[in-house]
Image (cartoon, rainbow, N blue to C red):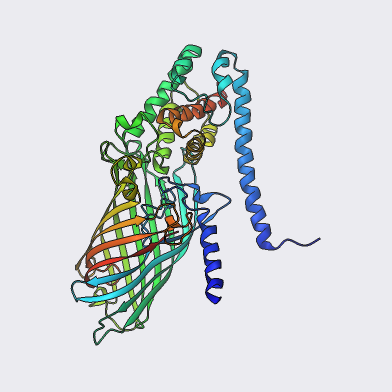
């Protein structure tokens, strides 16, 4: 009885949120700044598809929050993970062709991670979590060079991380993400079709500046091994492959229509210590079609999916070396 | 009488703001249509230029009809088509522009780019006067996106690239009619 009381409001909340979310996986619904829906609630894995001109409703390409099982190939440890970013974002955009400020997004977020170690070491607990409340802002400015046919996104987000081990640290991340439409296959940040194939891609290069400051508690992060702060500067490249509407005409197209593949490479250098950090990952996301699946109503299915990823290098949050394979369920709003 | 809660008041205010924006756009479109109807030389074409996307208007014969009934405006149409095709070709192959609107084109950045490119090309054109405010009110990524969604819903087989170009032309034409010099 109690369980039913909990589930009904949750489903009702998800249904009300889904009214503003994608009904059709293939379309980019841009009405996030509509007067009827001035705020969007986004549940994601990272900030990648945020922004005033992004298709935040394009559910197939979005990476959702995950509940997964992970295998750390460096330490041979298995763990269960919950990873996610919940944000409330207000977006406004100016469609005037003469406008320099094309739009902005502001919001608040809570990023959370909970790890249950099946084989904890002497310095680890079975369960550990980190919660980071923070603020987010992003503007899209039209690039004054007409030949570039595009705009520059400037994203800023920062918060304070509270770990269950007692460690506290602040982080501030600034990103410059250009989106230009210069020529065929030369349009960073914008969708491109690969020839006449059923595949499209978006290649997004960006420059990222990350400032982290150690506040207190046990010092276990490589970032703070010799100092109390770190200033990492470096490029990130994200290549996203996704099917276009032609996919339905190929064998197995119905299945692949809900898939997307994301390659990420981020390299940075700490300006204080000169230390190099690098993170590389590949993730396959599958979004359920708009049909009733696993007991979910059809209109809720596109908010859920599967996620398989492999990543190696320095963890973005701590700088610690890791190499892990994850498989799990994803949820996105 | 029961007093409204602040939350209800805020909701009503937001709803009113939305309605006001819609009404403003509707009024602007009506005024444009009225002005269009008054232009005698354009009777055949403007008779068809009702506010909003008209599926009857956007068929394959549109360019031919325009060339016959108003050759002057056929040049404007060709200008808009060339600019729009230039933008679209940066995202998909030419062969993908003969059919339904590809997903890569139904994207905020690309729709913004097409309106902006038409504005840059025609804004300072020696022949055409384009009212910038009317242009901004009509040709924007959200309006085009809504039009595409509506067309996909009402006439899915006619949600083609040709239709989208004619839809954009429709808005350029409205902005041209709204300019004081026209």
Residue plotted at (51% across, 32% down): B135
The front one of A192 and B54 is B54
Q: Is residue A20 visible?
A: yes
Q: Position of residue B105 (x, y in %)?
A: 38, 38
Work out which residue is located at the far bottom of the displayed protein and give it: A122
Quarter of the figure with the N terminus of chain B: bottom right
Residue plotted at (42% across, 45% down): A27
Q: Is residue B127 visible?
A: no
Work out which residue is located at the far right of the displayed protein and give it: B1
The front one of A243 and A187 is A243
Quarter of the figure with the C terminus of chain B: top right
Q: Is residue A314 above or below residue B102?
A: below
Q: Is residue A86 above or below residue A226?
A: above
Q: Position of residue A55 (x, y in %)?
A: 41, 49
Q: Position of residue B66 (x, y in %)?
A: 48, 17
Q: Is residue A149 above or below residue A267?
A: above
Residue A128: image quadrant is bottom left
Residue plotted at (58% across, 50% down): A35
Q: Position of residue A162 (x, y in %)?
A: 39, 77
Residue A137: image quadrant is bottom left
Q: In this rendering, would B170 be left or right of A117?
A: right
């Amino acid at each position: 009885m109690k369980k039913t009381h909990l589930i009904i409001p949750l489903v009702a909340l998800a249904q009300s949120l889904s009214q503003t979310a994608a009904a059709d996986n293939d379309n980019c619904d841009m009405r996030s700044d509509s007067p009827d829906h001035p705020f969007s609630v986004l549940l994601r894995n990272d900030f990648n598809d945020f922004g005033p001109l992004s298709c935040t409703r394009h559910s197939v390409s979005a990476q959702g929050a995950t509940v997964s099982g992970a295998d750390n190939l460096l330490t041979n440890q298995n763990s269960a993970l919950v990873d996610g970013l919940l944000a409330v974002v207000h977006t406004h955009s100016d469609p005037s062709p003469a406008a320099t400020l094309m739009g902005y997004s502001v919001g608040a977020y809570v990023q959370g991670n909970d790890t249950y170690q099946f084989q904890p070491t002497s310095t680890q607990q079975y369960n550990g979590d980190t919660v980071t409340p923070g603020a987010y802002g992003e503007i899209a400015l039209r690039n004054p060079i007409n030949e570039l046919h595009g705009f520059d996104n400037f994203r800023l987000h920062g918060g304070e991380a509270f770990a269950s081990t007692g460690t506290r640290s602040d982080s501030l991340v600034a990103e410059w993400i250009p989106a230009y439409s210069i020529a065929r296959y030369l349009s960073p940040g914008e969708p491109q079709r690969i020839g006449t194939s059923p595949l499209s891609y978006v290649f997004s290069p960006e420059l990222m500046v990350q400032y982290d400051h150690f506040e207190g508690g046990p010092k276990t992060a490589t970032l703070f091994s010799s100092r109390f702060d770190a200033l990492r500067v470096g490029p990130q490249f994200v290549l996203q492959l996704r099917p276009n509407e032609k996919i339905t005409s190929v064998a197995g197209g119905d299945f692949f229509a809900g898939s997307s593949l994301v390659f990420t490479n981020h390299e940075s250098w700490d300006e204080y210590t000169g230390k190099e950090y690098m993170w590389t990952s590949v993730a396959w996301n599958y979004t359920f079609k708009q049909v009733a699946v696993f007991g979910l109503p059809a209109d809720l299915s596109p908010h859920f999916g599967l996620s398989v990823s492999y990543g190696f290098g320095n963890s973005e949050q701590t700088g610690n070396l890791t190499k892990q394979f994850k498989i799990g369920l994803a949820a996105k709003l | 009488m029961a007093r409204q809660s602040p939350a209800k008041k805020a909701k009503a205010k937001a709803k009113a703001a939305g309605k006001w924006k819609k009404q403003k756009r509707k009024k602007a479109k009506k005024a444009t249509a009225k002005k269009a109807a008054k232009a005698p030389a354009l009777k055949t074409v403007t008779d068809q230029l009702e506010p909003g996307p008209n599926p009857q208007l956007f068929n394959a014969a549109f360019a031919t009809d325009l060339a016959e009934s108003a050759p002057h405006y056929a040049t404007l149409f060709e200008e808009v088509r060339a600019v729009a095709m230039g933008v679209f070709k940066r995202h998909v192959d030419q062969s993908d522009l003969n059919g339904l609107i590809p997903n890569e084109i139904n994207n905020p950045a690309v729709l913004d780019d097409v309106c902006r490119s038409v504005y840059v090309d025609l804004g300072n054109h020696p022949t055409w006067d384009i009212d910038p405010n009317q242009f901004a009110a009509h040709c924007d990524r959200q309006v085009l996106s809504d039009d595409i969604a509506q067309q996909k819903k009402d006439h899915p087989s006619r949600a083609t690239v040709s239709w989208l170009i004619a839809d954009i032309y429709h808005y350029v034409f409205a902005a041209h009619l709204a300019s004081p010099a026209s």
